Image (cartoon, rainbow, N blue to C red):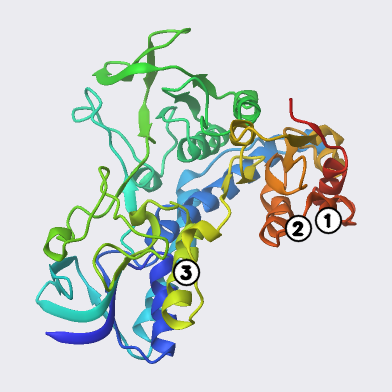
Amino acid sequence: MQEFDAIIVGAGQAGPSLAGKLTRAGWTVGFVERKFFGGTCVNTGCTPTKALIASAHAARLNRRAEDFGIVPSIAVTMDMQRVKQRMENIVANSRNGVERSLRTMERCTVFKGTAQFVSPTQIRVGDNLLSARHIFLNVGARPAVPNLPGVNTVPHLTSSTILALDELPPQLAIVGGGYVGLEFAQMYRRFGSDVTVIETKSRLVAHEDDDVSRAVQEILEDEGIHVRLDAECISLHKADTGIVINVRCAEGEPEVTASHVLLAMGRTPNTDDLGLEAAGIAVDSQGYITVDEQLRTCVPGIWALGDCNGRGGFTHTAYNDFEIVTANLLENDSRGVSDRIPAHALYIDPPLAQVGMTEKQVRKRGRAALIGIRPMTKVSRAVEKGETQGFIKVLVDAESREILGASIVGTGGDEAIHCILTAMYAGKPATLLQRSMHIHPTVAELIPTVFGDLKPLD
């Protein structure tokens, strides 16, 4: 048995940073990773997908060359092997950097293998038995494969396995109209695939506001992506023409035929093989480890960070989990999950960014509110770039002028929205941004204009 001050399981976004902070504080750390260092973000999430999105964006700009007064000399074609190689090089550099950092970290010992609890203070990794008074679980999540009829007999892809493709699917059907599905939909449409998105609900990104969902759908359909909504009783089977997805929709054909199928229907936490029962750690009905405000499990001395705790599901929330844990543990700084303001982005092009409350949530709270909306057609920067789809929307409390939330669908919105988010964290009223002077020409320069043109939310 090897004894440490702390054991960290999982090298996703929170784990390596936590190891660095603990070892600098003089702790000894046993670090366990069973496969790829860097977690979902580096290996199958943000890093590879955004690299692919960049290639798709370049292809799109080339095809639009004449819109900018450029006469292309040759037609744009995709070399998917080179696209994949570029993505893999970026991933490898990041992954190797994380592993190298951990293996050279003073007072940190790295173990490769699957971690399993023996007791609340002991974890077995292969032939190694590790012991510590502090254990941090950062084991992440994986794509969920729902039990659809035919799913076990028909070849299908997930957001992880599709990254191995080095050829272009002639027809790609994507089951799921959330963030993951839509990013792959636009990406592969720009690569040249015929793409259909199948969503069980009545609109895409259904937890967003109606106007946001409509704007997202318009962006995708303008590029030739087919969208099938209200798809019920989805099943799959093989046919001579390819893979057939059976749907029952209010409109359209009852079947969609494709050469490839991507299932993008949520994620499952990697908690099923940790032996949590040996430590008495509680999970919810979906397998997420239950935690309190400070990310402590029901067992003293054990924390859960990142995707496996069900309290965020994003890279930025996982990193914030690390900040919360170390603030409470090392810095006598009381921080909790409820301190953070919800914020996320959908990286289609142009992107969607949303912070704070949605319009639907503001209406539900039953208090007088104000709304400001500005179409991107009125944003000079968007016009100059030839990217005028979308809008800026802000929501404000009518009495206190507290900023309640904002959504930006449009070019640069994923960056511009952070000035609103910063004002919200500072507890500043809408008048702060209304009276701010922003640089021209930017997307952010229109934010003061939007806050200066607030109207009652009917």
Find residue 358 and report its horizontal and vertical position in percent: 61, 38
- Left or right, 81 with respect to 259, comes to right
Which residue is more in the foreground, 117 or 396? Answer: 396
Total label count?
3
Which amino acid, by three-letter code, is at mark 1? Leu
Find residue 281 and report its horizontal and vertical position in percent: 21, 60
Marks 2 and 3: which is nearer the front?
2
| Distance between mark 1 and mark 2 Cα atoms | 6 Å
For image coordinates 37% across by 35% down, the residue present is 265
Crowding at label 1, few (<14), some or many (≥20) Cα neighbours within 10 Å?
few
Report the residue marked by disc 2. 428
Q: Earlier in the sequence, mark 1 or mark 3?
A: 3
Find residue 107 and report its horizontal and vertical position in percent: 33, 90
The numbered dot on residue 324 is 3
Report the residue marked by disc 1. 432
Q: Give the quadrant of residue 255.
A: top left
Q: Secondary structure at mark 2?
A: loop
For image coordinates 52% across by 39% down, the residue present is 183
Crowding at label 2, few (<14), some or many (≥20) Cα neighbours within 10 Å?
some
Which amino acid, by three-letter code, is at mark 3? Ile
Find residue 380 and report its horizontal and vertical position in percent: 88, 42
Residue 348 appears anywhere in the view: yes
Q: Earlier in the sequence, mark 2 or mark 3?
A: 3
Name above or below for residue 194 compared with residue 454.
above
Q: Secondary structure at mark 3?
A: helix
For image coordinates 87% across by 56% down, the residue present is 438
Tell me, yes or no, whether the two marked residues, 1 and 2, touch with CB atoms within 8 Å.
yes
- Left or right, 434 with respect to 320, comes to right
Q: Give the quadrant of residue 348.
A: top right
Name above or below for residue 13 compared with residue 312.
below
